[in-house]
Amino acid sequence: MAFLNYVGLDYGDELVTSTTESRGVTLGTKGLMPDGRVFRYSLAGEAITAGVLCQNSLAIANHDMDLVTAATAAGASSIVVTLGGTAATADQYKGGTIYVNDGDGEGQSFRIATHAAVSSSGSFTVPLEGKQTVQTALAATSLCGVKANPYNGTLIYNGNSGINGIPTGFAPTDVASGAYFWQQTYGDGTAVAQGTVVVGKMLTPGLTTDGTCDVHIATGDAGMNVAVVCSPISVTTDIQHVFITIGS
């Protein structure tokens, strides 16, 4: 039986953080406010301050691709891979994805269900969520990778020392490392804007200071648009009122 992946939030719910999962919803669940603002339920991978742009957790090189994969028949509800030299904790990849990156069955991807811890270089039986089954058989020469739920281990957007993630939302309040929180993806909000901003102009992830936003330039800017500047205009490095546009 499937369940809708959203919940209704009241004013103030979006500011609640907790060191324990207390909402009874999965990471990535959409939270809808009466005024149309949209949030995503997340787990912080480090301390995050209000107004900061966030990103997904970092991929793990010994898990992310080219994992030796056992031959798997079509219709199977799990896939067995051998991890590289990094252990995986219980449910580290719950709600994430396993995908076939090479060989027979390549291009398939599946959501991962709850799973046990796996030792370094250990055999990882990856359970597929719900009614998912392998559609095209995998051979012993097939290769897979696993990646975490993008809202599990949320980090401050890293634009200064090298982009290694995608924007996932803005923190509406200060969040402690290891705390569950709601990051905002759409609607009226705040951001730390760098440089001279103009009402109505788009903002992109900042490339000089982590967690900030830069003004979109007309050409040569490959950054994703994450917000629109709203009035009034703040002074440089102050918090700017914006309309967030990452996802509705």
Image (spheres, rainbow, N blue to C red):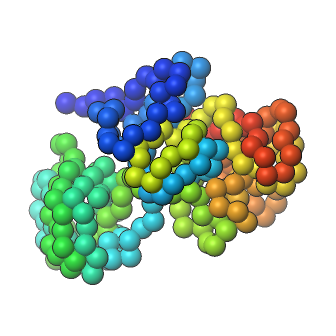
Along the horizontal axis of the image, is 226 left or right of 198?
A: left
Locate residue 158 relative to residue 69 in the image: left or right.
right
121 over 21 or under it: above or below: below
Left-right relation of 103 to 80:
right
Q: Is residue 233 above or below residue 142?
A: above
Above or below for 86 versus 181: below
Q: Nearer the viewer, residue 47 or 27?
A: 47
* Quadrant position of the C terminus in the picture: top right
Question: Relative to residue 209, is residue 13 depicted above or below?
Answer: above
**What percent of the width, then of the height, locates residue 88?**
25, 67
Judging depth in this view, the residue of 149 and 12 nearest the camera is 12
Question: Tag count in the figure?
Answer: 0
Q: Where on the picture, by quarter, is residue 4?
A: top left
Q: Residue 217's spot in the image, x, y percent?
A: 82, 56
Residue 17, percent from left and from top: 44, 38
Horizontal and vertical percent for residue 89? Answer: 24, 63
Residue 29 appearing in the image: yes
Q: Residue at x 65, y 65 (%)?
A: 159
- For image coordinates 79% across by 52% down, the residue present is 237
Q: Residue 55 or 5: which is nearer the viewer?
A: 55
- Where, quadrant-wise, is the N terminus in this rendering? top left
Quarter-wise, where is residue 147 in the image?
bottom left
Residue in the picture at 32% in, 40% down: 21
Residue 6 falls in image quadrant: top left
Apparent side of residue 85 relative to residue 127 in the rendered image (left or right):
right
- Of the pair 238 and 25, the residue shown nearer to us: 238
Inspect this view and state whether residue 137 appears.
Answer: no
Q: Residue at x 22, y 77 (%)?
A: 120
